Image (spheres, grey):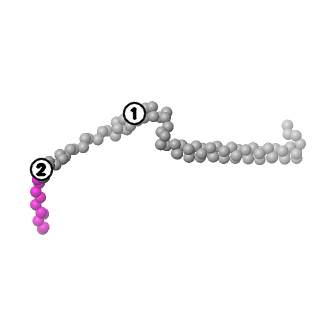
Amino acid sequence: MEKEPETIEVEVVEIDGIAPVPHVDPEPEQDPRQQGWNDWQNWQGKVRQLDIRWWPLWVVLGIVVVFLILTVGIVLGVIYGIYRIIIGFLRAILGPLK
């Protein structure tokens, strides 16, 4: 069985005439639910404002939304055009539909 080395605990009072910085225990954590609520309270009034740092994101998202709206519009236009062509053929074959 090996013998463990002996540990010696010391407290440094001063090194070269300079006292060491005292150790400060960190303050206990707040309840996570309370901390989350405090974060939301800081958002009052900020919800209605757009932060200038995010403008590139808003530009990209705006372009994506415009392309999606245009794509949906084109698809609906093509479907309506096909519908009108089919109705035209049916009227030409069967005569006026009542």
Q: Quadrant of residue 43 in the image?
A: top left
Residue 84, position as x, y percentages in the image: 79, 44
- Could you tell me which residue is drawn at 54 percent across and 43 percent down? 58
| Magenta span contains residue 7 | yes
Q: Secondary structure at mark 2?
A: loop
Look at label 2 and name its amino acid: Gly
Mark number, residue 41: 1
Of label 1 and label 2, which has the lower sequence position?
2
| Mark 1 → mark 2, Cα distance in angstroms | 48 Å
Identify residue type, mark 1: Gln
Residue 3 drawn above or below residue 15: below
Q: Nearer the viewer, residue 59 or 24?
A: 59
Q: Quadrant of residue 40?
A: top left
- Verify whether residue 96 appears in magenta: no
Q: Residue at 84% x, 44% y: name it.
A: 88
**Residue, far front:** 17
Up-down relation of residue 91 to residue 5 (above or below): above
Mark 1: secondary structure: helix
What percent of the width, then of the height, locates residue 63? 59, 45
Region of the chain picked out in magenta, as a range:
1-12
Disc nearest the viewer among 1 and 2: 2
Q: Is residue 81 left or right of residue 13?
A: right
Q: How many marks?
A: 2
Q: Give the residue pinned by disc 2.
A: 17
Furthest residue in direction top, as rendered: 45
Q: CB of mark 1 within 8 Å of CB of mark 2?
A: no
